[in-house]
Image (cartoon, rainbow, N blue to C red):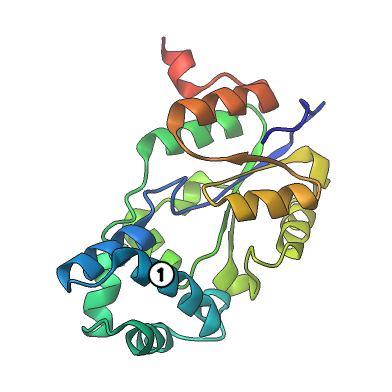
C-alpha cells in the first residue's frame, strides 16, 4: 500500500534477499526439501522461525545453531557447509537493481541496505562486492535487532540522519512493510520489477534506469 505522495524523500532503504538479490534463503530451503523429499513449505516456514529462535539472525547464535535446530524440527539432513551453500548460491544480485541504486544516488538520495541477515551477508559481499554500491549496510546480525522489531526502522533512519517521513523502505515481506509504515516511513511491498519502478517514480519523482535508457 502506498501513502499519499511525500514532499521529499531523502533516503531509500532496500531489503537484500528478494529485492536487491533473488530470495536465496527460501529458494535454497525449497531445493533442499525437494531433494530430500520433504515438504518445501514446511521447511521454509520452519527455517524462517529457526533462524530467529536460535538467535542467528540477530547475532546471538551461530550457523551451527541454526542448522542443528532446523534438523531437529524437520528431519533435514546434511552437513552445515553443504546446507548453507545451497542457500548462498541462490542469492543472485539483480544487476538492474544495482543500476537503479546508482541512479538514485546520483540524483542525491542516500541508499542503504536494511536486511534481516546473518553473517552470510558478509560472506556474500566478499564474493559479490555489492556493498560499495550503497551508502550504508544495516544487517540484523550486527545490529542485534531484526525487522520483527519495528524500532529497527527508528534506528536506521536516525543513523542516516533523516526523519521517518523522509525515508522510503522496500521489502518483499508484507509484514516488514507494514511495520515500517507504522513507524512513519513510506514503504513499497516489492512483488515485481515493473510495479516497483512505477511506485518508486510516484514516491521519489525519479525516473527509472529503464526510462532513462529509452
Q: Is residue 56 above or below residue 154?
A: below
At x 35%, y 90%, the residue is 72
- Say whether residue 168 is left or right of residue 88: right
In which quadrant will I find the C terminus? Answer: top left
Q: Is residue 25 above or below residue 62?
A: above
- Residue nearest the viewer, comparing 130 with 97: 97
At x 76%, y 64%, the residue is 151
The total of numbered circles placed on residues is 1
- Say whether residue 127 is left or right of residue 21: left
- Residue nearest the viewer, comparing 170 with 106: 170
Q: Quadrant of residue 4?
A: top right
Coordinates of residue 180 in the picture (x, y in percent): 71, 51
Coordinates of residue 102 in the picture (x, y in percent): 51, 34
Q: Quadrant of residue 152?
A: bottom right
Coordinates of residue 120 in the picture (x, y in percent): 41, 69
The residue wearing badge 1 is 120
Q: Residue furthest top?
A: 214
Mark 1 Cα-neighbour bin, 10 Å: few <14, some 14–19, many ≥20: some
At x 25%, y 80%, the residue is 81
Q: Is residue 18 above or below residue 195?
A: below
In which quadrant will I find the N terminus? Answer: top right
At x 45%, y 85%, the residue is 62
Q: Secondary structure at mark 1?
A: helix
- Residue nearest the viewer, comparing 75 with 192: 75
- Say whether residue 2 is left or right of residue 199: right
Coordinates of residue 76 in the picture (x, y in percent): 26, 81
Amino acid at each position: 500500500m502506498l501513502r499519499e505522495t511525500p514532499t521529499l524523500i531523502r533516503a531509500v532503504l532496500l531489503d537484500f534477499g528478494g529485492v536487491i538479490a533473488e530470495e536465496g534463503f527460501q529458494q535454497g530451503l525449497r531445493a533442499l526439501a525437494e531433494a530430500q523429499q520433504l515438504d518445501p513449505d514446511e521447511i521454509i516456514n520452519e527455517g524462517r522461525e529457526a533462524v530467529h529462535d536460535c538467535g542467528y539472525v540477530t547475532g546471538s547464535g551461530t550457523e551451527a545453531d541454526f542448522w542443528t535446530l532446523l534438523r531437529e524440527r524437520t528431519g533435514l539432513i546434511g552437513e552445515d557447509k553443504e546446507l548453507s551453500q545451497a542457500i548462498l548460491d541462490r542469492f543472485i544480485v539483480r544487476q538492474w537493481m544495482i543500476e537503479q541504486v546508482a541512479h538514485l544516488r546520483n540524483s542525491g538520495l542516500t541508499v542503504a541496505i536494511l536486511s534481516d541477515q546473518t553473517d552470510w551477508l558478509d560472506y556474500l559481499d566478499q564474493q559479490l562486492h555489492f556493498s560499495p554500491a550503497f551508502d550504508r549496510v544495516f544487517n540484523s546480525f550486527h545490529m542485534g535487532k531484526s525487522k520483527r522489531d519495528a524500532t529497527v526502522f527508528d534506528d536506521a533512519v536516525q543513523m542516516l540522519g533523516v526523519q521517518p517521513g523522509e525515508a522510503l523502505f522496500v521489502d518483499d515481506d508484507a509484514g516488514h512493510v507494514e511495520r515500517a509504515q507504522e513507524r512513519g516511513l513510506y514503504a513499497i511491498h516489492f512483488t515485481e520489477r515493473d510495479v516497483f519502478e512505477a511506485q518508486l517514480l510516484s514516491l521519489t519523482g525519479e525516473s527509472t534506469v529503464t526510462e532513462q535508457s529509452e
